[in-house]
Image (cartoon, rainbow, N blue to C red):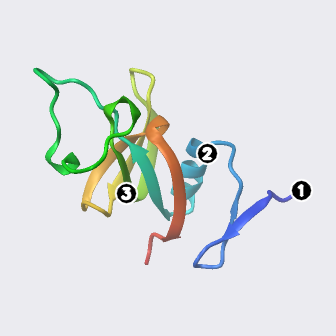
Amino acid sequence: MPPLLEEETEIDERVPDFVNIEQALQWAIDKNRVVKIFYVTRGRKRGRGGKILKRERGISRADGGGVNIHRIVEPHHIYKAGNGNTILITYDRSVRHIRAFIVNNIYDYNFTKNRKT
């Protein structure tokens, strides 16, 4: 039986429903798809009073002190870190650098287009 179909994308390819975000990201890697991820940074105290990163100034804080951000990424690899976190390695088009994201901190995603475009 073919997978359930959820939406059509710009390049007229149907995207299946996924059980979890990790499965969706693996599909994006396999299909060379660009993904817009919605991510929450995890706030933590650093030194006296905590450190606010320059890029986080002026952005409202989420519960726990983190910041909600979105990035347009080309996912390349997923692996399990020694501390148990599942890590997504990407080329981040938003900042034009290779970046790593903790998969559990990604709370939503949208497929955009084929990596070739």
Up the image or down, 117 lies above or below 17; here it is below
Three-letter code, disc 3: Arg
Up the image or down, 44 lies above or below 69; here it is above
**CB atoms at circles 1 and 2 under 8 Å apart?**
no
The residue at 38%/39% (across/down) is 62
The answer to which image quadrant residue 96 occupies is bottom left
Percent from the top left, x then y, of residue 16? 71, 59
Q: Where does label 1 land, which residue?
A: 1
Is 114 or 51 nearer to us in this picture? Answer: 51
Q: From mark 3 to mark 2, how far is it between C-alphas?
A: 19 Å
Q: Where does label 2 land, which residue?
A: 23
1 or 2: tag closer to the N-terminus: 1
Three-letter code, disc 1: Met
Q: In which quarter of the image is the C terminus?
A: bottom left
Q: Where does label 3 land, which residue?
A: 71
Three-letter code, disc 2: Gln
Q: From mark 1 to mark 3, how far is it between C-alphas?
A: 34 Å
Give the side of residue 105 with respect to residue 30, left or right.
Answer: left
Percent from the top left, x then y, of residue 42? 34, 33
Percent from the top left, x then y, of residue 52? 17, 38
Q: From mark 1 to mark 2, how far is it between C-alphas?
A: 19 Å
